[in-house]
Image (cartoon, rainbow, N blue to C red):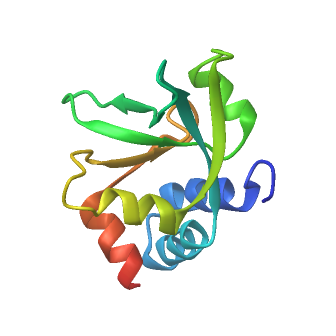
Amino acid sequence: MEEKNNELLDSINEWRTKNDSESFKKVVEQIKNESFYCPIKIEEDGSKMIAITKNAKGDSLLLAFTSKEEAQKWSKDLTITYEIHSFEQYANLLLMESNNNLGFVINPYGVNLALDKNIIKDINNY
């Protein structure tokens, strides 16, 4: 895994500037092939819980970070560990019927790109 996923970040910024289909396709391809730092909280009973954040509407989103530095912008809590999850792992988790999260957000204190379940389904089918 490239530590900061610079190509993905550059592509997201390019897409936001150009706002065209070619730039969007590049972002989609890179997201499909990327892995992210996924914050995990260890509960007192030893179970693992994936950390979430809420958007302005109160919807829950899983967190996905492109580097440890980006993750530390979110939390400096030393009890949080990080696992590397692929886009496919996030998609599989989010698309389960029992999952009530809206989607996931990449670098909420950086590029802040939120992907809801409908977009995730589209990316999966791309």
Apparent side of residue 30 relative to residue 7 in the rendered image (left or right): left
Looking at the rendering, in which quadrant would you find the N terminus?
bottom right
Apparent side of residue 115 relative to residue 80 in the rendered image (left or right): left
**Residue lying furthest top in this view?**
77
* Residue at 72% across, 42% down: 67
Which x, y percent locates residue 62? 41, 42
Q: Report the number of numbered marks.
A: 0
Q: Nearer the viewer, residue 117 or 23?
A: 117
* Residue at 49% across, 55% down: 16
Residue 70, placed above or below residue 29: above
> Where, by quadrant of the figure, is residue 56 drawn?
top left
Which x, y percent locates residue 59? 22, 35
> Where, by quadrant of the figure, is residue 107 drawn?
top right
Which x, y percent locates residue 32? 54, 72
**Residue lying furthest bottom in this view?**
126
**Residue lying furthest front in this view?**
45
Looking at the rendering, in which quadrant would you find the C terminus?
bottom left
* Residue at 55% across, 34% down: 40
* Residue at 61% across, 70% down: 30
Residue 18, placed above or below residue 43: below
Which x, y percent locates residue 122? 32, 75
Apparent side of residue 116 relative to residue 113 in the rendered image (left or right): left
> Where, by quadrant of the figure, is residue 70 drawn?
top right
